[in-house]
Amino acid sequence: MSSTEEGSPTPGTTQMRAFARGFLAFALSCGIPAPVGIGAQAVTFTRYDSALIRSGDVVFRRGRSVISDVVVAAESEFRYSHAGVAHVDESGVWVIHAEPDDALGLRGSVKRVPLHEYLSAQSASGAALYREPSGTHGAKASAAAVAFFEEGRTFDAGFALSTDDALYCTELVWKAYLAAGVDVTRGGRASLTFPVGQPPYILPGTLAASGGLVAVPGFAREDAE
């Protein structure tokens, strides 16, 4: 494969990413269904170490759907399509995340689910764990995420970072940490070729590339099927 200069994407790759971002916007706005069992099937998520998780950690997952594949394709490097905030208490490890309940994305909510459900074989084909590097803001961010759940905040189908009554997945992570006093995006934003809702956006890769979060090594292992 050739490129215009070493380390730069080829024009074809750039066009493919632009198409993927545009298709993502179309899919999210028009409700292309995302059936389980279609999409990221080249890798099976096999095991993870829950003992590594602290409250406030960000748990990324790569789903098993067409939409998940499109989100990953729209990113330049990052391989995960969804994010939630971990909360650890005496009853176990939980993930607070925002997702739609229907294909149209018109209904949905902030949810609190056990880690094993969030990373079940039906929901995830891969996972990664990231942490705010200072280690001083996680507990407050986790508490803020739990509050979003308890307040009954809905899924943000308008993808509007300027409003607080509804949240989408990466917006929830960002605003939980803002409540704790730190901007983990460090101002990073993404755009889509065909904007939907209210741009700009925070994509999973926006969080990972910002430097406001760092990867926790050894959390998950993926094996080829």
Image: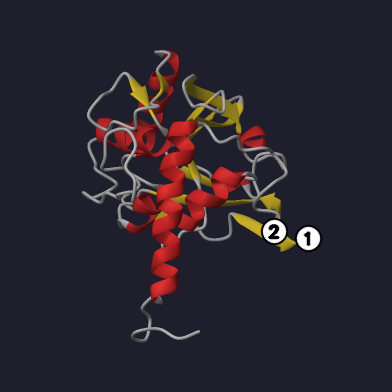
Give the answer, above or below, for where 206 lies relative to 180. Answer: below
**Residue furthest toward the top?**
151
Residue at figure coordinates x 33%, y 51% from the top left: 193
Along the horizontal axis of the image, is 163 left or right of 44?
left
Q: Which mark is residue 43?
A: 2
Along the horizontal axis of the image, is 86 left or right of 174?
right
- Frontmost residue, 96 versus 164: 164
Category of crowding for the residue at label 1, using alpha-carbon neighbours closer than 10 angstroms: few (below 14), some (14–19), many (at least 20): few
- Frontmost residue, 200 versus 168: 200
Q: Secondary structure at mark 2?
A: strand
Quadrant of residue 178 within the rendered picture: top left
- Asked if the residues shown at circle 1 and circle 2 are in contact, with their CB atoms under 8 angstroms apart, the answer is yes
Quadrant of residue 115 within the rendered picture: top right
Q: Secondary structure at mark 1?
A: loop
Q: Which mark is residue 50?
A: none
CA gap, disc 1 to disc 2? 6 Å
Give the answer, above or below, for where 31 lies relative to 71. Answer: above
Colouring of the image:
secondary structure
Q: Amino acid at mark 2?
A: Val
Asked if one can make out residue 196 in the rendered structure from this viewpoint, the answer is: yes
Which comes sooner in the sequence, label 1 or label 2? 2
**Residue furthest toward the right?**
225
Q: Which mark is residue 225?
A: 1
Residue at figure coordinates x 61%, y 24% from the top left: 91
Q: Amino acid at mark 1?
A: Glu
Residue at figure coordinates x 40%, y 65% from the top left: 15
